[in-house]
Amino acid sequence: MILQAGQQAYLSESPNGRYRILIEQVLDRRVDDNIFFRYPVILENVENPDRRFETADAGPVLVHQTDKKTFEIEWDNGDPPRLKAVRFDWAPDSLKYFMHLEVLDGVWKTYFVDINKGTTTDITADLEQALSDRIDFHNWDCQQPQFELVQWTQPYLAFFKLTSICGKNKEKENHDLFYANDSVLFDTQQVKSVSHCSECKDESALKKFDGYYNKSLPTPTPTAEETPTSE
């Protein structure tokens, strides 16, 4: 449930309760009698609110400015209601998360936020790359894919599933539609996608991603064998 705090709204809290995500109304500029605001999404330390940083700016899809120059958050019609245009996937260690934000109507971006480094990276294009290449190769006509975090396979590796509704021809109206899927492994240490699996069931993708993890482990240094000595 969102808590209001002046011109702030709390959107999410880390699993360990140490961090929270909020949105603020900030004066951007004034032109004659017109006032324009920004709505930054901010990561804040609960115990020390001065330790905070902006991650991204939200837009009208998420926030609605009232006649009183305050703002409201947009909710869907679910039961229970959920935030309409943003969702968060926290890592189990509470030190990083993914934010999926609708920046324009129907246009979503996915950001990776590293709390220790205080950084935010737009990873949308990186996650979409393999699926986009396949769509371009076949000349399909596809919607922007929907992103789902299936699970964290390791503390620093995240398994995403991308699904896009497609037609087979960009030049014609498509009556027969199908789903194009891509499974992607994202490495939060390298801050990039490191493996993917096209049209794979989750079990097959996990097996491939486990193979990537096992190959990335350092090879143990062999210990020198003791030379036998004669007594």
Image (cartoon, rainbow, N blue to C red):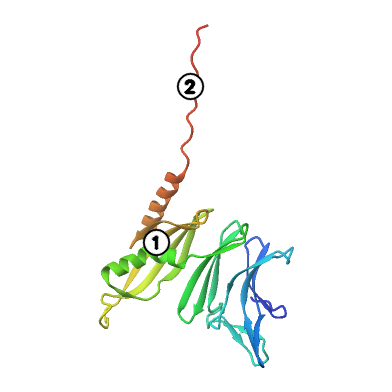
Residue 42 lies, in percent from the top left, at: 64, 70
Q: Residue at x 44, y 62 (%)?
A: 160
Q: Residue furthest top?
A: 231
SS type, badge 2 = loop
* Secondary element type, mark 1: strand
Residues under labels 2 and 1: Cα distance?
Answer: 44 Å
Residue at the far front: name it.
32
Find residue 185 and report its image quarter: bottom left
Q: Measured from the top left, where is residue 111 in percent x and y?
A: 52, 67
* Precedes in sequence: disc 2 or disc 1: 1
Mark 2 residue type: Glu
Q: Is residue 172 left or right of residue 120?
A: left
Q: Residue at x 40, y 48 (%)?
A: 211
Task: Name the spot of residue 92 as percent of width and height, x first.
Answer: 58, 57
Which residue is tagged 2?
Answer: 225
Q: Residue 183 — which label?
A: 1
Q: On the picture, is 10 further left or further right than 132?
A: right
